[in-house]
Image (cartoon, rainbow, N blue to C red):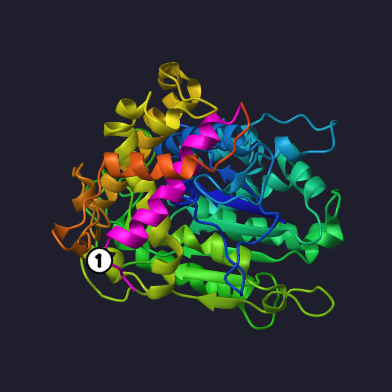
């Protein structure tokens, strides 16, 4: 099964970044029996005309790094456990039709939209007087002058016009060509802005009305299981006299959009959307820099994005009987919401619900311990124990592209992610930020007590356990990278089970 994930606008990119962190930690979608969904490929597609958006660029770089690391570890295999378990591919990578020329990227090409002012896009200057008057009633002068390469600046009415062109693009045709029965579609977008609020319903409409389009697999798309994460207001902005984006309008825009979504997406009389996840927070974030788009929009990671990242994974694991009837047609929309176990401003693992903890706790703790080990302990283990077993991990491994990407680019992004969430409001404090002692790494959780005090967790404990596991492990000569991460993953699980207090 392929899950096509359309991440629309800035919120889409930020939620997708959190999903990549969960995937790097080894979090996989689970079916109704608690087993990993088999043969799954994730196909992220970012839709945002604002190519200068710093959050988009950070996510794109992370996607590229994840894909390289994952391919080096597992190649094309899907059903694997451990770090970087979810297979993530580009649309170009899975295309069968060579007549369509696409770049091998995760970014949807919107060049026809992004290079114009909105007025130029709709041909305002070439309209007759009556049509110009009508357009001036529908759109303000600021909207007509809006340069769409910075997005739609909180105006879904112009976004809905511009993004309707997506259905005629090569990317949309390529998506239709590779979509097969059994695949699923998921959208990530905010409801209180411009790009996401507009792009989500437009894309669903074009997929459901595929019979009217000149594309392949029209009937399959018409019946496709479609889910969506609708992110309600969750951040605030610094005060600014420029009112193109006004946080005071977020709630009004949300209310209006929810009524529209009810009529077009989620109402009981239609079957446009199978599943919708609602997520928001009334606790104001640390105010973000007011930036309609000209300066890049680099926002701190937020707890809402972490929780939102679990929505496409949950959707992938829902049984088909919850999505479609016996004839394969979509069932009316089922809505999901999310609540913390504890309404606190500092969110740790104990504040999350039991289902969430069961899904992410072990995986994220193992990944955090890997982060600490690679940064402070791994270099000193080379030449000892398991590193001398075949295939050997030699000193030149530290200079390899794999290690530099993993320990540099990816772990650097991970450190930024957990630090930004910690410094936001609500603060996410799963780990003690800046703490390099593995005994104290997990917030409000100690190692267990032994006869001579609390059991110790450090790099030597990992070396000893990895040495033990390596004695019976067999890896191919070109699986140095897999050997390192697989041994660490298995060692970390045993150490968590035996040496840290339980959250259960």
- SS type, badge 1: loop
Q: Quadrant of residue 435?
A: top left
325 in relation to 78, above or below: below
Residue 498 falls inside the magenta stretch? yes
Provide residue 253's location: percent of width, then percent of height: 42, 64
Residue 333 percent coordinates (x, y): 62, 77
**Position in image of residue 482 (x %, y %):** 54, 36
Left of 83 or right of it: where is 427? left
When the figure is inspected, residue 268 is found, relative to residue 410, above or below; the finding is below
Residue with the mark numbered 1 = 283
Q: Decide whether the magenta segment is chiefly helix, strand or loop.
A: helix
Residue drawn 45% across and 60% down? 308
Report crowding for label 1: few under 14, some 14 to 19, many 20 or more residues within 10 A (C-alpha). Answer: few
Compare residues 304 and 244 and report the one nearer the observer. Answer: 304
- Which stretch did the figure color magenta? 478-504
Q: Please say whether residue 280 is one of the residues in the magenta stretch.
A: no
Residue 423 in view (yes/no):
no
Q: Quadrant of the N terminus?
A: bottom right
Point 64% across, 34% down: residue: 112
Image point 33% across, 49% down: which residue? 301
Whether residue 434 appears in this view of the structure is yes
Q: Kindly identify the residue that appears in the image at 33 percent across and 54 percent down.
A: 302
- Where residue 417 appears, as percent x and y from the top left, is 33, 45
How many numbered circles does the render carry? 1
150 lies above or below 185? above
Quadrant occupied by the C terminus: bottom left
| Residue projecting furthest to the left | 453
Q: Looking at the picture, tell me which residue is in the foreground, 153 or 321.
A: 321
Tell me: 232 left or right of 316. Answer: left
């Amino acid at each position: 099964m392929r899950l096509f994930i359309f991440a629309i606008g800035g919120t889409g990119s930020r939620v997708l970044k959190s999903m990549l962190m969960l995937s790097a930690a080894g979090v996989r979608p689970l079916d109704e029996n608690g087993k990993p969904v088999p043969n799954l490929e994730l196909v992220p597609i970012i839709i945002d005309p604002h190519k200068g958006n710093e959050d988009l660029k950070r996510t794109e770089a992370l996607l590229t790094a994840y894909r390289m690391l994952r391919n080096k570890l597992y190649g094309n295999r899907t059903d694997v456990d451990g770090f970087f378990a979810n297979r993530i591919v580009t649309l170009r990578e899975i295309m069968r039709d060579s007549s369509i020329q696409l770049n091998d990227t995760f970014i949807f090409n919107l060049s026809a939209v992004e290079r114009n002012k909105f007025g130029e896009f709709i041909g305002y200057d070439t309209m007759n007087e009556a049509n110009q008057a009508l357009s001036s009633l529908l759109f303000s002068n600021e909207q007509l002058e809006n340069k769409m390469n910075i997005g739609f600046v909180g105006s879904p009415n112009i976004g809905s016009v511009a993004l309707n062109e997506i259905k005629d693009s090569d990317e949309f045709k390529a998506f239709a060509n590779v979509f097969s029965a059994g695949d699923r579609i998921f959208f990530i977008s905010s409801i209180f802005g411009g790009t996401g609020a507009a792009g989500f319903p437009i894309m669903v409409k074009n997929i459901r009305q595929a019979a009217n389009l000149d594309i392949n697999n029209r009937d399959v798309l018409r019946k496709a299981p479609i889910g969506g994460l609708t992110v309600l207001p969750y951040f605030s902005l610094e005060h600014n006299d420029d009112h193109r984006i006004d946080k005071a309008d977020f709630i009004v825009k949300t209310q209006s959009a929810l009524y529209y979504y009810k009529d077009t997406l989620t109402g009981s009389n239609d079957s446009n959307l199978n599943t919708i996840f609602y997520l928001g927070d009334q606790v104001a974030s640390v105010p973000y820099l007011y930036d309609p788009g000209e300066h890049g929009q680099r926002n701190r990671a937020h707890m809402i994005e972490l929780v939102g990242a679990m929505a496409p994974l949950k959707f992938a694991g829902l049984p088909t009987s919850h999505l479609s009837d016996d004839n394969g047609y979509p069932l009316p929309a089922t809505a999901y919401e999310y609540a913390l176990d504890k309404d606190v401003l500092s969110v740790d693992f104990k504040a999350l619900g039991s289902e969430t903890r069961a899904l992410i706790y072990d995986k994220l703790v193992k990944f955090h311990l890997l982060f600490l080990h690679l940064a402070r302990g791994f270099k000193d283990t080379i030449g000892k124990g398991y590193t001398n077993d075949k295939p050997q991990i030699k000193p030149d491994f530290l200079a390899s592209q794999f290690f530099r990407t993993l320990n540099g680019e990816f772990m650097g992004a991970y450190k930024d992610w957990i630090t930004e969430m910690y410094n936001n409001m609500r603060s996410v404090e799963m780990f003690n930020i800046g703490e390099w002692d593995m005994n104290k790494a997990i917030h409000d959780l100690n190692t267990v007590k032994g006869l001579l005090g609390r059991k110790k967790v450090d790099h030597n404990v990992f070396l000893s356990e990895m040495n033990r596991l390596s004695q019976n492990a067999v890896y191919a000569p070109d699986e140095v990278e897999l050997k390192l991460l697989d041994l660490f993953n298995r060692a970390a699980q045993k150490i968590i089970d035996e040496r840290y207090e339980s959250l259960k």
